[in-house]
Image (cartoon, grey):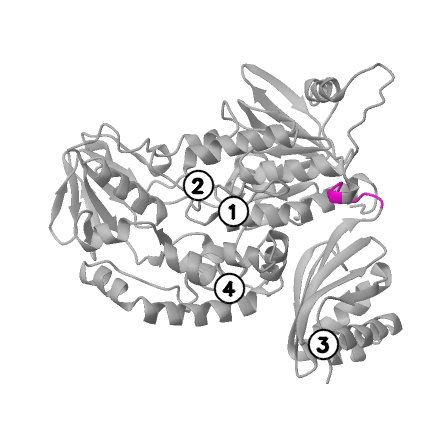
Amino acid sequence: MTDVASWLASFNEALLAGNEAAIAEKFLPTGFWRDFLAFEWTLATHEGAEAIGAFAVAHAGRAAPRNWTTEAEAGASEGFIAFETSTGSCQGYLRLVEGKALTLFTMLGDLRGHEFPLRYRRENGIFDDPSGRNWRDLLLNEQATMGITKQPYVLVVGAGQAGLAIGATLRLLGVPHLLIDKHPRVGDQWRSRYKSLTLHDPVWYDHMPYLPFPDHWPVYTPKDKMGDWLEHYAGVMELNVWTETELVSARHDSATGTWQACVRRGSETMDLQPAHLVMALGNAGFPIVPEIEGQEHFRGPQYHSSAHPGGDDLEGKRVVVIGANNSAHDICADLVVHGAKATMVQRSSTHIVRQHSMTDVMLKPIYSQEAVDAGITTDRADLLGASAPIRLQEIGARRTWAAIREAEAPFYERLEKAGFRLDFAEDGAGISGKYLRSASGYYIDVGASDMIADGRIALKSGTEISHLTETGIAFADGSHIEADLIVYATGFGSMEQWVARLIGEDVAAKIGRCWGYGSGFKGDPGPWEGELRNMWKPTAQQGLWFMGGNLAQARFYCRLLGLQLKARLEGIVTD
């Protein structure tokens, strides 16, 4: 019987021999190899034994893999693996079915000679400076000169969770960096949201890289607490951050290989010349406000959900929220708590996942206190999550959601009885599919669904909006809803919009879509790519990168993006 250890030994022999047929034979005909920088300087999934064999032969010579080991016990058909390449130390995970690989995941962990200074590699903290400067002197000097007399190698646009994560990685790897953010303080992205907001994912899933939340941290983080943590994080990780600063424009100079980035810092405009530009503005573009006939006639305020300050001072007011995804639900629930009369207008079906289903079913095996107690660290949980290629994630999600739909049938029946239109993604993959495909069309229920089911949140669904009147909204079925305020919880555009505005329409067209993987389902046209488009890896525009996603994605992928940038700084990769 072939186990993990024996498979690795024979796989290594085939790699050393450059035997494409022998390599392919190690995999199931429908097997997968997901490689993150270990063999090739990008993030890619290779599907099918034939394609895998060709990939291995094309890249094994440069990578020179060796010293394959595993923690898996004798006879085990899956387990964590480790190995080395000419570039550095790597890790991964292997799953076998009847002696052949169903999935192989390989990932670069450290660059040789430029390892992360963590744990036993940490700095000793003793400074021997000829001028007698201590740690604080040196740090303040760097922060005072970066972007002024010294150019950053990497300019990160946005100092939210994604920007801070890549900034921390660059700091640890010794890459000169500068983060810019339009808000007055780091964390204001969260502080400025409506008062009742909390993170919808549990604490075990939401740790920031290198500095996890303490053990007393609440399961679901309040938004102001999250904002304060991010500000604390930027200080502890010693990041170079300019607040109240915006990118005005950027142009890549192919002759020098640098960007000409114009930024506005307070009232001052200045030019920066970084080699790399990282767009860390979340995983969305600009707020979408639909054009509806009669908008100019409505007498009350109307604005996008991103501008909603909360339900304070709205007691007794009639508020109509157009939309039925996360923000719409959260805002409606907040309005009810503050005594407003909330009506949700559902224009299309929505996927609902109960928070306990996320926490106790979907995430619990690897992101929970039980998982931590069983020895599954956050790093291991992240690696396990990444070890499954998206094609198999879809299959697993469909199975999981079939079980959840059956177990939660009474809950969903109550919602449908109230007139709420449900979906579970076109193929039944639920939130897992919807998030990776379009990052829209769902709500993680933290209480608003019960409010809809029992009528505390009024629901208008099943008919189109006809037009706005002076006092409210008229619908195609002839009905009319009176409103004092209209909130458009109608989502955001895509990330490439930022590129079109700040860099140019030509560059936006050159790089193409961001996010999604070519599933062919709603909001995610083909062709199939198997990895998220343009995220955390090289784009068609030299020196332009995207860093976004939820907290877990920011934590995991910041290391991979940081390694790519460090490799270019050190001349290991030249492009």
Specify whether residue 217 is painted magenta: no
* Residue depicted at x 86% and y 56%: 86
Between tags 3 and 1, which lies in front? 1
> In the rendered view, does 216 fall on the left or right side of 404?
right
Q: Nearer the viewer, mark 1 or mark 4?
A: 1
Task: Indicate the position of residue 223 as horizontal and vertical percent values.
Answer: 42, 36
* Residue shown at the point (71%, 76%) measured from the top left: 50
Residue that badge 3 annotates: 50
The disc labelled 1 sits on which kind of residue?
Asp
Q: Earlier in the sequence, mark 3 or mark 2?
A: 3
Magenta region: which residues? Answer: 113-119
Q: Earlier in the sequence, mark 3 or mark 4?
A: 3
Cα separation between marks 2 and 4: 32 Å
User: Which numbered dot is residue 519?
Assistant: 4
**SS at mark 1 in the image:** helix
Please give the residue where the numbered disc 1 appears in the rendered image: 206
Whichever of labels 2 and 4 marks the residue nearer the N terminus, that label is 2
Is disc 4 placed on a helix, strand or loop?
loop
What residue is shown with label 2? 221
Q: Residue at x 86, y 62 (%)?
A: 64
Q: Are marks 3 and 2 in contact (CB under 8 Å)?
A: no
Q: Nearer the viewer, mark 2 or mark 4?
A: 2
In-front residue for pair 386/125: 125
User: Closer to the camera, 254 or 463?
Assistant: 463
Q: For mark 2, give the secondary structure.
A: loop
Which of the labelled discs sits on residue 310, or is there none?
Answer: none
Q: Are marks 1 and 2 in contact (CB under 8 Å)?
A: yes
**Relative horizontal placement of residue 1, taking residue 399 as reference (left or right):** right
Would you call the spot at circle 1 few (<14 residues within 10 Å), some (14-19), or many (20 or more)? many
Residue 550: give x, y in percent of width and height: 51, 47
Q: What secondary structure is marked by label 3?
A: helix
